[in-house]
Image (cartoon, grey):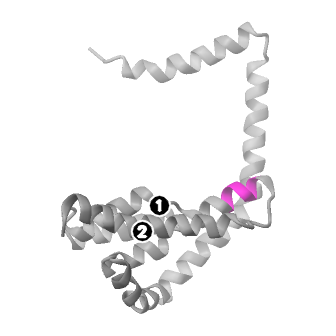
Amino acid sequence: MQSLNHYILPAIVSAFLLFGLLRGVAVFDVFLEGAREGLSTAARILPSLVGLMTAVGVFKASGAMDLLSHGLKPAADFLGLPSEVMPLALLRPVSGSGGMAIYRDILQNHSPDSFVGRVASVMMGSTETTFYTIAVYYGAVGIRKTRHTLPAALGADLAGFVFSSLAVLWFFGR
């Protein structure tokens, strides 16, 4: 016998349709209007996303990420971060898929239960793809000046990186 989990989503969609029909809303027309807005939003933010993904690809392919990671090793040591997670710390604010690829490499090269693997795991869960998020949300509403958003978000990412290492040390030790 199937569990009730298989019926939750269809029940929610049916409830919305029924509620709209009872309120006299032209449900299909409203759906089409929302789909039209979604497509126009996607068309508005597409150039920002293409530019961002191109920049990430160039950054990784040129070797600049490896060079920058190696150059930041003293800063990582000072902050208590394992140097193996520096590529993740550099790429995570820019690209979720790039960050995920580096995260997967870290877990393949180090055990998920190692200090490095745990720090990378906490880092993935406690930081955001800052530039991607700003590009998508600000691009969707047409905001050009990020003002205080970018420094505050990058500060939060830095705190997430440092405290991921501290949290792993506190809970698991080295």
Q: Residue at coordinates 26% horizontally, 71% vertically from top-left?
A: 116
Q: Nearer the viewer, residue 143 or 140?
A: 143
Task: Say if 165 sits above or below 1 in the image.
Answer: below
Q: Which residue is mark 1?
A: 127
Disc 1 and disc 2 in contact, CB within 8 angstroms: yes
Q: Quadrant of residue 122?
A: bottom left
Q: Which residue is mark 2?
A: 161
Which quarter of the image is occupied by the N terminus? top left
Q: Residue furthest front?
A: 170
Q: Residue furthest top?
A: 22
Residue neighbourhood size for the residue with mark 1, other residues' Cα within 10 Å, grouped as few (<14), some (14–19), many (≥20) = many
Q: Quadrant of residue 80?
A: bottom left
Query: Does any portion of residue 92 appear in the rendered image?
Result: no
Q: Earlier in the sequence, mark 1 or mark 2?
A: 1
Q: List x then y, in percent, for residue 108.
A: 24, 69
Residue 136 highlighted magenta (yes or no) = yes
Query: Does any portion of residue 124 appear in the rendered image?
Result: yes
